[in-house]
Image: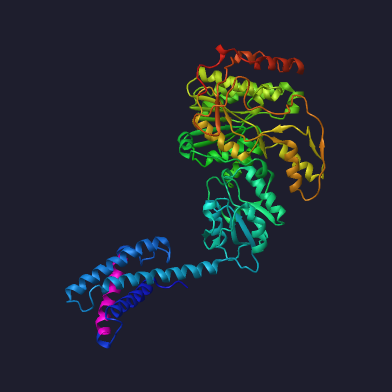
Amino acid sequence: MRPSPLAVDGVAWAAGLTAAVFVRDEFTMDAARLARIIPFVLFAVAAQAGLGQLRHLYRGRYAFASFEEIRALWPTTLATAALLLVADLLAGRPVPTGAPVLGGVIALLGMLGARYLHRTRRRHRNRPDARTAGRVLLFGAGSAGQSLVRSMLSDPRGRYLPIGMIDDDPRKRRLHLSGVPVLGSRTDIPAAVARTGATTVVFAVANADAELVRAIREITVAAGVRFMVVPSLSELMDEKVDVLDIREARVTDLLGRHQIDTDLDSIAGYLTGKRVLVTGAGGSIGSELCRQIHRFRPAELMMLDRDESALQAVQLSLDPHAQLTDPSVILASLRDVARVREIFAGRRPEVVFHAAALKHLPLLERYPGEAVKTNIWGTLAVLSAAAGVERFVNISTDKAANPTSVLGYSKRITERLTAYTAQVCPGTFLSVRFGNVLGSRGSVFTTFSAQIADGGPITVTHPDVTRYFMTIQEAVHLVVQAAAIGRDGEALVLEMGKPVRIAEVARQMVALAPNPVEIRYTGLRPGEKLAEDLFGVGETDCRPLHPLISHVAVPPLDPAEVQRLSADAAPEILVGELARICAAATPEEVSHRPAA
């Protein structure tokens, strides 16, 4: 039960003034001296109550023993001591000189001590039960780790009891956070596990890269205990880490996490209060775009896709009570040019993220005409209708750099069509290029997951094939950031970290699987590279505005070039035409706007 703050402070004043007079009178006390103290104690309590009322100290504004209450308490107590000193002087000093000041200091220490004891009792009462909660070590004593410790220690029915922290920063050695000690660096994990009896290590660094996650996991598994993680910063969406966020490690944590530095003000500047349209909103990239854009409070978020089920899924992820009658949902195909123009004319979007595309590489090799109809002509339809928008962002891929596949050719052409539109239309038109996205629909991650669930084998094309990887959240996080700083006509290339062997992805997923799974190599497929490029011939890695975003110039392409394509031509002829269009442009064709 919470004590009465005024009663606590009244007792503190009585004890403080009595102790002060006792000290000033050389540790002697009689009935006469005590009689002189009583009126001052009553005056002190009345003054404390009066001044406290003015500061709302005793009117329920502050929680007892909170830091906010303490900030209001100490000036109130010192002001009361000053009033007591004046009253003592005016009354002819019935108590020794200085006793009101010394008494005030002692009273304040008593008040703070009582509150500290209350906080300590409450913290002990809220700790998880050591008999039922699992003993955990936390790797990371930064903001995420501290937030997680506080969350763990505030739930008496919690499943985790933090008994130590690990951090590589030597400045944090011997540090205690909410009573939990830092026990050493990563090399001390095995010893800390043995000494504390911990059964789990929780990786509590939200803005860490995959390499660090893998390193700590290997040490933890070797120590014979469970390894768990908190989500990455992009998954948390700037929310504080909570104990409910702790989960098992995924392959996205082991291979796709990157450190993200975000300028939220620049993002909000072009999204907040704007009418925003996302094409391909039902896809994995488009749906994550919608979720991240939604938090910046656009005036209207329009979600366009031809898949009604996918549209409803992304809409429900934003609003569980939404109906398909909501005008934010737009069912349409980019192949319907007239419908696309009607949507832009009626809804008048100001910012467009164009994420709609066919992306299955082997299928597009067999059916290049479909890539022309959707990826090229569909993009051209959107670009033509978007002539009046403020900002247009074309979602591209690393396969557009030095393309060798139908998917790469089609996405390179969309980059060049976007650059052409930038030259002939007002507003900012740009492309954003990144590599494979772990967890996106049809990605190697989902394919391997399905094969593992089926008992295997996992099929890998080649033991040396490498790809760049990011999680969906991190890729989209940087796309939204890149769109804020991108300049007209250029392509922005996102930092993807080091390329990862697909075989390593398979091995990591097998390591996380409940049962052993075979890995089988099948050979490279038509149009597939052994290693992807992020930059094409003649493009340089220049990062003038953001450490994770490169800017490259893109040669414009006249739409007449692609309008002459025949989507019904024989596949080999059509592929040859796409390759010809993507051939290196002459210097005169490159936009006059520099990449940096």
Hey, which quadrant is residue 20 in on the image? bottom left
Judge whether 236 appears above or below 573 on screen: below
Q: Position of residue 321 (x, y in %)?
A: 58, 47
* Region rendered in magenta: 33-53
Nearer to me, 309 or 317: 317
Q: 115 left or right of 24?
A: right
Residue 167 counted in the magenta span: no
Hey, which quadrant is residue 374 in on the image? top right
Q: Position of residue 464 (x, y in %)?
A: 75, 32
Q: Is residue 324 visible?
A: no
At 54% from the left and 30% from the top, the residue drawn is 352
Number of marks in the rendered image: 0
Nearer to me, 131 or 406: 131
Q: 340 left or right of 273?
A: right
At 59% from the left and 12% from the top, the residue drawn is 586
Nearer to me, 178 or 340: 178
Judge whether 27 appears above or below 447 on screen: below
Residue 44 counted in the magenta span: yes
Q: Is residue 306 visible?
A: yes
Q: Position of residue 279 (x, y in %)?
A: 60, 31
Q: Position of residue 349 (x, y in %)?
A: 51, 30
Judge whether 565 appears above or below 151 on screen: above
